[in-house]
Amino acid sequence: MNEFVIKKLTKYFMTESMDSYEAEILEYGIATTVLNLPKSLLLIAIAMILGLTKPLMLIFLFYGMIRNFSRGIHAKTALGCFLVGTANYIGMAYLAKVITVPQKLYHAVYAYCFYVYYKYAPSGTEVNPVYPDQVMLLKKWSLIIILSYYIIGLKQQRGMIRNVGMLSVLSQSISILPVTYMISKQRGGIIHEEE
């Protein structure tokens, strides 16, 4: 059923001026939306029950932005994706609400993250590879986003937005590490060789 909806929506939104790469990106975006909408609604319902709606919405924005540019590992199954994603999002939302990070730890986390993203971002997968002409742009934007979150957090000194930014880049840094791919028995860092 999902495949049918994805194909129909892709055909509807495709234009004659799109090349095969643009059509592939369009289809991937539609597939991501169709497959993630029910999970996202369930995640929002869980957050509402737990009183974590505000931090969850901030995490959707902060984490989503850094993940979009740095890419990273994906779970092998829809259930695995939902369980890991829910634990990640709800865990970050809860921590963003309750923790206070000392300034030295804050600087150390961002120094670690900047190094990890500089070295490993973007990290593609077999399903969602990175193309050679995308690498520098995705890496640059990953680093710009990290620096932006860092500066926003410096101005705040404490609070939910500071925590959400830091937790987002820290959590996402794990998904681009080679050891994470090794543990999950997946290939990472895949650069698609253009034909």
Image (cartoon, rainbow, N blue to C red):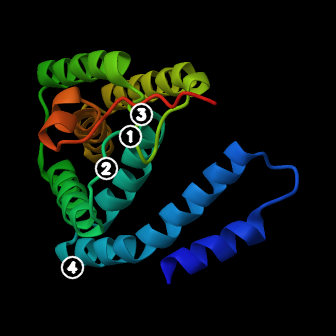
* Badge 2 vs badge 4, beta-carbon distance below 8 Å: no
* Badge 1 vs badge 4, beta-carbon distance below 8 Å: no
- In whole angstroms, how far apart are the C-alphas of marks 4 and 3? 31 Å
Residue on which the image places disc 2: 74
Viewer-proximal residue among 193 and 1: 193
Viewer-proximal residue among 164 and 170: 170
77 to 60, vertically: above or below:
below
Residue on which the image places disc 3: 70
Local secondary structure at mark 1 = loop
- In whole angstroms, how far apart are the C-alphas of marks 2 and 3? 13 Å
Query: Is disc 4 surrounded by few (<14), some (14 to 19) or many (20+) residues within 10 Å?
Result: few
Q: Amino acid at mark 2?
A: His
Local secondary structure at mark 2 = loop
Q: Amino acid at mark 4?
A: Ile
- In whole angstroms, how far apart are the C-alphas of marks 3 and 1? 11 Å
Which of labels 4 and 3 is toward the front? 3
- In whole angstroms, how far apart are the C-alphas of marks 1 and 4? 34 Å
Q: Is residue 123 left or right of residue 89?
A: right
Viewer-proximal residue among 69 and 45: 69
Query: Is disc 1 surrounded by few (<14), some (14 to 19) or many (20+) residues within 10 Å?
Result: many
* Badge 1 vs badge 2, beta-carbon distance below 8 Å: yes
Residue on which the image places disc 4: 49
Which of labels 2 and 4 is toward the front? 2
27 to 22, vertically: above or below:
below
Q: Amino acid at mark 1?
A: Thr
Viewer-proximal residue among 183 and 94: 183
Query: Is disc 3 surrounded by few (<14), some (14 to 19) or many (20+) residues within 10 Å?
Result: many
Q: Earlier in the sequence, mark 3 or mark 1?
A: 3
Residue 21's x, y, as percent? Answer: 68, 43
Q: Earlier in the sequence, mark 1 or mark 4?
A: 4
Residue on which the image places disc 1: 125
